[in-house]
Structures are given as structure tokens and as C-alpha cells.
Amino acid sequence: MWRSSACLLLVAVGGLLPARPALARVVINELYYDHPGTDTGHEFIELINTDIAPADIAGATIEFHNGAGTTWVLVWRAPAATTIAADGLFVLGGDLVTPLPDAVTAYSLQNGPDAIRLVDADGQVVDTVGYGDLDDPAFAETMGAAKVTAGKSIARALDGVDSDDNSIDFIAATPTPGRHNVARYDPVLILDAGMAVRGARDEPGIERIRVRIENHGLVSIAAGDVALELADSSAGVTEFSEAGSNQREIIPGDFERVVVNAALSRGYHWLAISLRDSLDERDDNNRVQLLRRVGRIPILVSEVWSSPREGCPQFVEWMNAGNAPVDVTGFSIRDERGRPVVIDVDTLVLDPGAWIALSADPDRLAECVPAAPQARLFGVRGAWPTFNRSGGALADSILVLDRYGIVVDAVSYPAVPSSSAGKSLERIDLFLHDGAAVWRLSDAADGCSPAIANRAFIDTPAPRGHVAVTPNPFAPARGDLLRVAATPSVDVARIDVWVYDLDGHRLAALGGTTSFPSLFVWDGRRDDGVAVAPGLYIVATEMFRADGSRIEVDKVVVGCAAGGVP
């Protein structure tokens, strides 16, 4: 009876003694052992407490096993009063780890196959992690985690989840010391689909930037928790403004689309939209950046020699169609598929109305075209983007890009018939507009005119509401082209242009368009290719509304001078 009472007393007394929380729910959560370059100071070991109560790890040790040996070496011993909060993390690492570890210590791990383990104060092994393809089950749980490349850590795929198989539990990851491998709270900001990182607009105004706030975490984001800020840097000045927030709860895996309005003036704008949330566990996915150019740069592709004579290089000609000089330093060109190549010049300012030509071999081009001004012929840095000379209705495209890779001019050009090999294509519509380019085969003595003004072009569109037909009369025998420039009134959605004789017979279709201002040309031939006789003809421009109903027909009588087309 006494003995029983004594036992009961011992149990009661034992229940009054403070108990130290066990380490059963503390495991190694992440390990970083191979930093690019020198490892010293960058390595870390992260522990996680998966319990709902704090874990006392005083006296616990971290030990290292060299895969080439059979023993364990002490790396670190936890001092008194060392605890890990519930669902908390504890990082042991070098002094170069960011943020600074909970325990800073100098140690050196090897790159595998090796192992580390966590041992409690009583000498019981709590967790073991073999890594670098360690295949000895005495030093790994089942099989070691696979080797990772320098700069990557091995991290539990699910924080704290331990299946006793290192090869399954751990994956290669971006190092996240002191942060959960899978964020509990992680709002992410990305550009919405279809939003260009770099782009241009012709006129100042409001740019509507669509972004998405995505929830990549494990818990919901409450309405209003995320705030967006817009930074607009232009002309050396940065302005900040509030840019909205999430209007509803965003559950894990869901998103909310937000439109950020940026008021843009002329010039270049470096835009940055940042996400702010005090609970966010990741700060490397909270920002999107864009570049916008406001205002059109008047550099136009004016000629292309896609089908040069044997032994001669291709060239692309540029013209400054504006009223002010343009610095084209760093500008580049590319074809429809290739990578851009930069003009090979340290500094170049193109005056209004001036012309230059780019070629893979400007010296050889000067030999092929003696009339070309050699000082205005330039090479490119890199492999020349060979421009197609044949194909269907269009042979290829040429894009001119500014120094930031934003499109300045983009045109498509037709194929050159084999019977016209050696002739370049000269552009007629040398003014700023959004319509398709209009081309003619060069009639220059050398078959082309690099860095020399094209003989037949229009550099000014017709005034609004007008159709201009020039020259009138025109002489096809001298190489004249009849040019029809149209800038109809705002209610016109489409125009078609035709040529008739005085008896009303339709002779030629010059084309149609829905973009304005526009330009059409006539070489004095009927649709069947036969030259018309000298005399008077009618150019009719039919105008239509968006619903297809015809508004009016603008008729101009033109004179075709004697001589015909040779």
C-alpha cells in the first residue's frame, strides 16, 4: 500500500516539473551547400518547427558526414534558451547569408555525396538529410537528395513534410533562407497577356496598363490588402502615384486584373508598377517594368535592293521625313524573322530630308553604284539580315528599331520579278502614316539610288477631306507615275480607286484601303498590262461608310501625255 502511494506521489511530483518540448516535429527544411564561386559565408541550413507550440532546441546539434568516411562531425550546438516558434523557421549560416541567419557560424559543407543530421540534447537523431546522390541508407533517409547546380539549394517540396525518403522530399530550389519554401502569403504582380514590355504610341495620352495580381500562396488575400504604386521616369525625373488595389478577396491560385492608368507626355517613359503588402513573404515578384515611347520618330525605309546585281550587296535606305534632325545612333534593322543588327557608327544625326543607306559591305556598294555618296553609306554590327527577293504578294518585311528596340518603321515590300533583277524598290509614300507602303521599281541608271533621293515620291499627305492627283498631266514614257493621295473625311471607312476612259469603261483598279492617309499609283497601263493611248482619263475615288454604303465618288480628269509606256 505504501509502495503504491509512493508511486502515485512520484507521478504527481513529476507532473509538476516543467517539460521541455520535444524535437520530434523539428526537421531540416532547406540546405544550401554550393554557392557559385567561393562557398564560404554563403552556406546555410534551415530548420522548421511544424508543431503548433514553440520548440526548445537548446543543446541540440547539427552534425556533418563526409560521404567518403564513416563518422559524423559536430557543426553547431544550440545554446541555452534557443527556441523555434510554432510553424517557425531557424537558419544557421554564414555571415554573407541574406537576411542574416538566426545563428551565424563559420562552417564548410561539401558538395556531395554528403549528409547532415539534427540530433536532440539527449543524443537522439531527429532528422537526417543525405544529398548529392548519396546512396548509403546509413547516412540518408532511404536515398539522398539529388545533386543540384551551384546557386541552387535543396528544399522540401512541402515545408516540414517528411516521408523519410530524402530523394522524394527534397527538390532543387531557389534559396529562401528564413522563408517558407512554399509561401503562405504571396501576392504576385505580372503583366496581363498582350501587354508589351516595350512599345510606342504616336500621341500623348492615357496608357491603360493591364496587370494581374495573382495569389501564389497558400492562404487568401483579403480585399484591399494589396496596394499598387506607379513610378514614371521621364527626362531624368521620377514621379510616383498610387495605382489601385485589389477590390476583392483573391483565393490561392486565383487572380484579379487591375488597370493602371499612366498619363504619358512626349518622350520616353520608364514605367515601374510595384506591389505593396506588409504580409508578403516574397519580394522578388512584386514589380513589372515597361518602356513607352510617345511620339513618332520620322525615320522611314525609303528603298530596298533585295535583288542586287551579281557581286553586289543588298542595301536598305532610310530617310528622315520630319522637320528636325534625328539622332539615329544605336538604331537597328531586321527582317521578318531575323535578329536586329545595329548601324555601325558611333554617332549619327540625320538631318531633315536626308538619306542614308545600310549594307553588309558599304565599300563594295560604292563600287557597284558609283553615283552613291560614299559618306552616307554605312555598315552594320553583326550578320546582315538577308532580305528575301521573291515570294508571294509580299517578299519580306523590314523593321527599323530605335536604340531601345522599339519599332520606328515597319514595312513589307513585294517580290522583284526575275525580269527586273538588279532593280531596287523605291518607296513613294514618304510621309508618316499607318497604311501599307507603296513601291515602284527604280528607273535609275544603276538600277538603284542608295542614299540619293528617290525620283518619284510624295512627302506630304493630302489635306483632310481631299483627294490629290499628281502630276497632271503625267508622261509614262518619261517614267512618270500618277499618284493619288487621299485623306477623306472622318465618316469615310473605306475608299476604292479606279481609272476609266471618257466613255465610262473601267481600265484599271488602283486598289482600296481602310487606313488613311493613303497613296495609290498608276503607271499608265490597263489591268491587262497594255499601255493606254495618250489622252484624257478619269480617276474615280469611291468612298464608303463602315456599313458599306457609298458616300460619294471623287472624279478627277487627268491627261496622259503622248509617248506611251516603253
Image: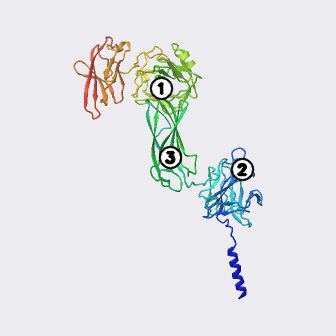
User: Which residue is tagged 3?
Assistant: 227
Kindly state the secondary structure of the residue where label 1 is placed: loop
Quarter of the image with the N terminus is bottom right
> 10 Å neighbourhood of mark 1: few (<14), some, or many (≥20)?
many
Kindly state the secondary structure of the residue where label 3 is placed: strand
Is residue 477 among the parts visible in the rendering?
yes
Q: Is residue 305 left or right of residue 344?
A: left
| Residue type at the position of mark 3 | Ala
Residue 399 position within the rendered picture, expressed as x and y whole percent measured from the top left:
48, 29
Q: Are marks 1 and 3 in contact (CB under 8 Å)?
A: no
3D distance between C-alphas at marks 2 and 3: 35 Å
> 10 Å neighbourhood of mark 3: few (<14), some, or many (≥20)?
some
| Residue type at the position of mark 1 | Ile
User: Which residue is tagged 1?
Assistant: 297
3D distance between C-alphas at marks 1 and 3: 36 Å
Residue 330 position within the rendered picture, expressed as x and y whole percent measured from the top left:
56, 26
Q: Nearer the viewer, residue 33 or 565?
A: 33
Residue 391 position within the rendered picture, expressed as x and y whole percent measured from the top left:
43, 30
Q: Is residue 319 left or right of residue 32?
A: left
Residue 460 versus residue 213 in the image, above or below? above
3D distance between C-alphas at marks 2 and 1: 53 Å
Kindly state the secondary structure of the residue where label 2 is placed: loop
Q: Earlier in the sequence, mark 2 or mark 3?
A: 2
Residue 370 versus residue 30 in the image, above or below? above
Residue 61, picture quadrant: bottom right
Residue 478, disc? none
User: Which residue is tagged 2?
Assistant: 94
- In this view, the residue farthest toward the top is 562
